[in-house]
């Protein structure tokens, strides 16, 4: 399967129309994911209880991002699924490892700019580790929603995005972090959706800082100017980490001193610590030579195998990887383990802002 390209689906229209098109195109996959969610309810809870809790998150989501709720309603319509269940798929906090003590997944991120890269371009690279079964439902969505910049993002069955970039030159990768302050609020997958709609880096950063969030990722956001931030977030706090010496890496634990107190369990961060430092070493050793082709090699690294950057075993494995060049609006995306995949190149046309758009 790793050699099969991830399918690309292009959608365009209002938020609801975009959602309907996604739902129609991904109907079997979305129905399968929701069925698996139904069968994997956390301990001491029922599906009905999860749906009731989801309604609390929905109230916050509708208040802050009503247009994205409309998009989710469209997905539910297109996929022939109850909206409440589709929205529940956005509420990762209800399945959060810190909440149920079940252990998290993993991702490893690289970022580079300026003198670190061959052409001085801004580049992000990301491996995404999930349960192996999720690889079959991967899709690349190319989305033009109303007057937002067109974006391209990698998704599981159209139900949320893991990484991507848009035609305004905003890039997004990042990592799951397990925090101890999870609460009812705006699901973090809606924050990701807002980042992908950002017209400038400030809008992406503001999304990471939205007050009513339920939890957060470490969102790595960047633009074509070479401005790169690792937004280490939790529900109640966030530390923006600015790139230093033109390189940056991150994995699945908090590295900034202000955020370490939010780590749900520091006894479980060993694998993440190894991947983070290994990624930084690879960036330093290849400073000035970094290119899409070299990032493909770095993401296939097997130090600490099988729980390496290219992850082959455990509860999660690497199901896809992506490289972004924000100056050229190009991406290279591969299914499965980086050491086995064939990357496919994708691109976007630069965004032409509407006449009434104001900075």
Image (cartoon, rainbow, N blue to C red):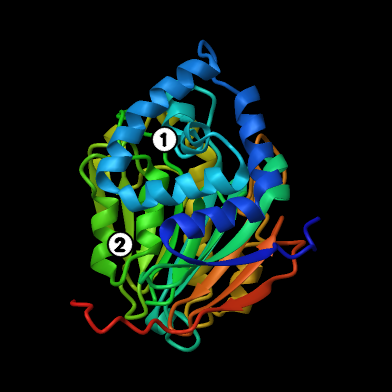
Tell me the quarter of the image containing the C terminus.
Answer: bottom left
In the image, residue 288 sits, relative to residue 270, either above or below, namely: below
Q: What x and y, as percent, mark residue 190?
A: 38, 48
Residue 223 located left or right of residue 273: left
* Residue 306 is at least partly visible in this image: no
Front-most of residues 226 and 333 = 333
Task: Give the percent coordinates (x, y) of residue 80.
Answer: 61, 41
Q: 151 or 256: nearer the eye?
A: 151
- Nearer the observer: mark 2 or 1; the answer is 2
Could you tell me residue 37's position as x and y percent?
A: 60, 30
Query: What's the residue at 63%, 65% (across, down)?
Result: 9
- Circle 1: element type: loop
Lateral position of residue 135 relative to residue 299, left or right: right
Q: Earlier in the sequence, mark 2 or mark 1?
A: 1
Q: Name the element at disc 2.
A: helix
* Label 2 crowd bin: few (<14), some (14–19), many (20+), radius 10 Å: many
Residue pictured at 39% horizontal, 73% vertical: 149
Q: Position of residue 76 (x, y in %)?
A: 54, 43
In this orientation, which residue lies closer to the viewer: 197 or 274?
A: 197
- Residue 139, located in which quarter of the rendered image? bottom right
Residue drawn where x is 44% and y is 52% of the image: 71
**Residue at (66% x, 34% y) in the render:** 315
Image mark for residue 178: 1
Report the Cα–Cα distance between label 2 and label 1: 21 Å
Quadrant of the drawing holding the N terminus: bottom right
Q: Disc number at residue 204? A: 2
């Amino acid at each position: 399967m790793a050699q099969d390209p991830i399918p690309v689906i292009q959608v365009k229209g209002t938020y609801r129309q975009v959602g309907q098109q996604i739902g129609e195109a991904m109907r079997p996959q979305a129905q399968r994911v929701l069925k698996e969610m139904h069968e994997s309810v956390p301990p001491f809870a029922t599906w009905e209880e999860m749906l009731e809790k989801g309604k609390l998150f929905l109230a916050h989501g509708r208040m802050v991002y009503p247009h994205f709720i409309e998009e989710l309603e469209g997905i539910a319509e297109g996929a022939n699924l109850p909206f409440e269940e589709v929205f529940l798929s956005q509420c990762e906090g209800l399945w959060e490892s810190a909440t149920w003590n079940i252990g998290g997944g993993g991702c490893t991120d690289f970022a580079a700019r300026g003198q670190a890269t061959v052409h001085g371009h801004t580049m992000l690279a990301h491996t995404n580790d999930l349960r192996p079964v999720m690889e079959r439902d991967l899709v690349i969505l190319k989305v033009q929603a109303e007057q937002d910049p067109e974006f391209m993002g990698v998704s599981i069955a159209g139900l949320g995005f893991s990484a991507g970039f848009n035609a305004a030159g905003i890039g997004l990768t990042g990592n799951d972090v397990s925090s101890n302050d999870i609460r009812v609020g705006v699901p973090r997958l809606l924050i990701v959706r807002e980042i992908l709609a950002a017209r400038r880096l400030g809008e992406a950063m503001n999304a990471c800082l939205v007050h009513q969030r339920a939890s957060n990722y470490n969102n790595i956001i960047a633009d074509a100017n070479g401005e790169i931030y690792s937004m280490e977030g939790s529900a109640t706090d966030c530390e923006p980490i600015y790139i230093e010496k033109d390189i940056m890496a991150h994995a699945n634990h908090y590295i900034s001193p202000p955020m370490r107190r939010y780590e749900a369990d520091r006894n479980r961060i060993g694998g993440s610590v190894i991947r983070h430092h290994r990624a930084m070493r690879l960036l330093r050793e290849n400073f000035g030579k970094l290119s899409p082709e070299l990032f493909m090699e770095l993401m296939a690294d097997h130090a600490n195998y099988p729980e390496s950057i290219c992850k082959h075993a455990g509860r999660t494995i690497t199901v896809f990887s992506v490289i972004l060049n924000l100056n050229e609006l190009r991406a290279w995306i591969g299914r499965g383990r980086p050491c086995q995949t064939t990357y496919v190149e994708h691109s976007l046309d630069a965004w032409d802002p509407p006449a009434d758009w104001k900075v």
